[in-house]
Image (tube, rainbow, N blue to C red):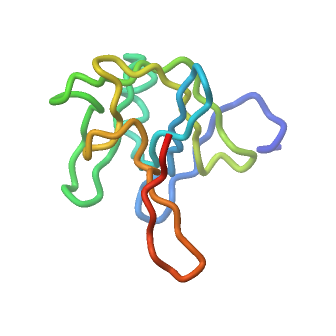
Amino acid sequence: MLEEGEAFTPRFGADGLLTAVVTDAHDGAVLMLAHMNAASLRLTLETGIAHYWSRSRQALWMKGETSGNVQTVVEILTDCDQDAVLLRVQVAGDGPTCHTGRRSCFYRSITSDGTLAIRRG
């Protein structure tokens, strides 16, 4: 049974992708949401460094390749039906994960009137 078995059999979507939630291994903060195809998942498992699939560029990429903020994988978890993964990572360099220079890509909250507010802290 998929939900209880020991075999990792990822269920890629029709687009060939898995959703990947990325958190800080130290404090659990959500850093980013990304996508992985079979090649990026294989590279991540083989190297211990997070690799993803860019939907906008249609290209494989290693997180931190240009910024130096490489994500070293501490643990990978999968959900019950194996169509998403959670990567617990340690971020090298000066720490930002977001291309905006912030620690997390989730730095704005949505207010009740539908506007965005920058989160502090």
Would you place residue 36 above or below residue 87 in this image?
Answer: below
- The residue under the point 58% across, 19% down is 26
- The residue under the point 61% across, 25% down is 27
Along the horizontal axis of the image, is 82 left or right of 6?
A: left
> Where residue 33 sits: x, y (%)?
46, 49
Along the horizontal axis of the image, is 45 left or right of 81?
A: left
Q: Dividing the picture into quarters, in which one does residue 43 lie?
A: top left
Q: Which residue is outermost to the left?
A: 66
Q: Nearer the viewer, residue 87 or 43?
A: 87
- The residue under the point 43% across, 41% down is 104
> Where residue 31 sits: x, y (%)?
47, 39
> Where residue 48 sits: x, y (%)?
42, 17
Along the horizontal axis of the image, is 118 left or right of 88?
A: left
Q: Nearer the viewer, residue 44 or 42?
A: 44
Would you place residue 37 above or below residue 68 in this image?
Answer: below
Q: Dividing the picture into quarters, in which one does residue 5 lie?
A: top right
Q: Nearer the viewer, residue 19 or 107?
A: 107
Would you place residue 118 above or below residue 7 in this image?
Answer: below
Q: Which residue is outermost to the bottom?
A: 113
- The residue under the point 28% across, 18% down is 93
Q: How many marks?
A: 0
Q: Nearer the viewer, residue 93 or 111?
A: 111
- Quadrant housing the N terminus: top right
> Where residue 42 sits: x, y (%)?
41, 30
